[in-house]
Amino acid sequence: MTSSASPSTPLRHPAVRLTGYAHGGGCACKIPPGELEEAVAGLTGQTGENVLVGLDDGDDAAAVLVREGLAVLSTADFFTPVVDDAYDWGRIAAANALSDVYAMGGRPVVAINLVGWPRDVLPLALMTEVLEGGLAVAAEAGCPVIGGHSIDDPEPKYGMAVTGVADPERLLRNDAAEAGLPLTLTKPIGVGLLNNRHKRTGEVFDAAIATMTALNRDASEAALAAGVRAATDVTGFGLLGHLHKMMRASGVGAVIDAAAVPLVDGAREALRDGFVSGGTQRNLDWVRPHLRTGPGIDEDELLLLADAQTSGGLLVVGELPGHPVIGHTVAGAGIEVR
Ligand code: CO
Ligand code: CO
């Protein structure tokens, strides 16, 4: 066979930019928080005697008591491509889906894949790479991936439904925060800005990929060891959005020290260069009525703190060795950023 093409490169599917097939990006393609709450307002109250954590406080995963001493956790997460590389996208989606189990203080025990694929447009070999990435991260978590469900879909989508187990007495809940405790964040924020820049320019941000593919397992175990009662993971609603949800569910307020919040390399530059996503703007609009800002906290600082994350870290009410304290909880309501 002859060909006039230049020598092939080792790149797997160099011509395909997966993010070009996504209308939104990652957790930034979530339905906006206010709209979602309104849409499901009449559907809460799934309270049976075995439901430990239901829908009412918008927690990370459902928790049911299956026998004395054993809670089963159930959660699902999937989204459109956040990065162009298929394998990395798979890894990120898996780490993100598993995270909701860790955010509850659980251990994932089985996962199933959820896939939408435009089979007329994109090669199935590329889908295989996505699934391989997911499998690699699940293997790192010690969580078997057994089957799943796939559909022909004009827009590629990938994620997992994950089942976990936890000690029912030691769940990390959204509604268990108390006043007067430190707030710890276990991953830097700003990946929403960098993913948006990547989608628009093709630049690759290794630090962002590294943090998005990292499991929240160690942070979860450290939180349990420290006796923490309340935690959540920071995803599409951003740091401010998830903090607001947890504080509201717990009936307490918070103070955030903006300068103490860790940022992924390049995030501030991406903000300066205008790569704020629509999801981030909606996050900030949603929490703004509950925000008070100190001197020197401008709109840009708030947009950074509201940046829609994909596979973000744990926001823990308590202190964890090796991770920055970014503020504290207070009696009252609302969030003060200073
Ligand atoms: Co979550
Ligand atoms: Co989730």
Image (cartoon, rainbow, N blue to C red):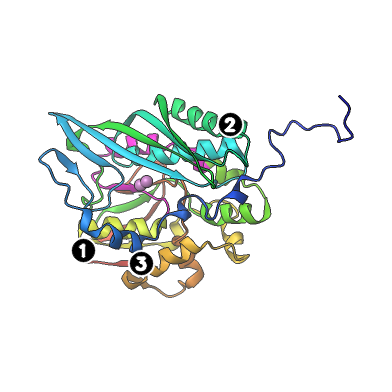
For marks 1 and 2 on the same chain, the one whose residue lies earlier in the sequence = 2
Screen quadrant of the C terminus: bottom left
For marks 3 and 1 on the same chain, the one whose residue lies earlier in the sequence = 3
The disc at residue 129 is: 2
Point 57% across, 60% down: residue: 268
Point 38% across, 40% down: residue: 99
Mark 3 lies on a secondary structure that is helix
- Horizontal side of 15 relative to 249 (left or right) equals right
State the CA–CA distance, disc 3 to disc 1: 18 Å
Q: Which residue position is annotated with label 3?
A: 287
Amino acid type of the residue tagged 1 in the rendering:
Ala
Q: Which residue position is annotated with label 1?
A: 331
Q: Which percent across, then down, holds residue 150? A: 46, 35
Point 42% across, 26% down: residue: 147
In the rendered image, which quarter is residue 84 located in? top right
Mark 1 lies on a secondary structure that is loop
- Horizontal side of 9 relative to 71 (left or right) equals right
**Nearer-the-camera pick, 318 or 289:** 289
Nearest-to-viewer mark from 3 and 1: 3
- Horizontal side of 196 relative to 303 (left or right) equals right
Q: Residue furthest bottom?
A: 295
State the CA–CA distance, disc 3 to disc 2: 38 Å
Q: Which percent across, then down, holds residue 162? A: 35, 34
Point 67% across, 50% down: residue: 203
Q: Which residues are magenta?
A: 211-236
Q: Which percent across, then down, holds residue 61? A: 29, 42
Amino acid type of the residue tagged 3 in the rendering:
Val
Screen quadrant of the N terminus: top right
Mark 2 lies on a secondary structure that is helix
**Nearer-the-camera pick, 100 or 147:** 147
Q: Is residue 315 magenta?
A: no
Amino acid type of the residue tagged 2 in the rendering:
Glu
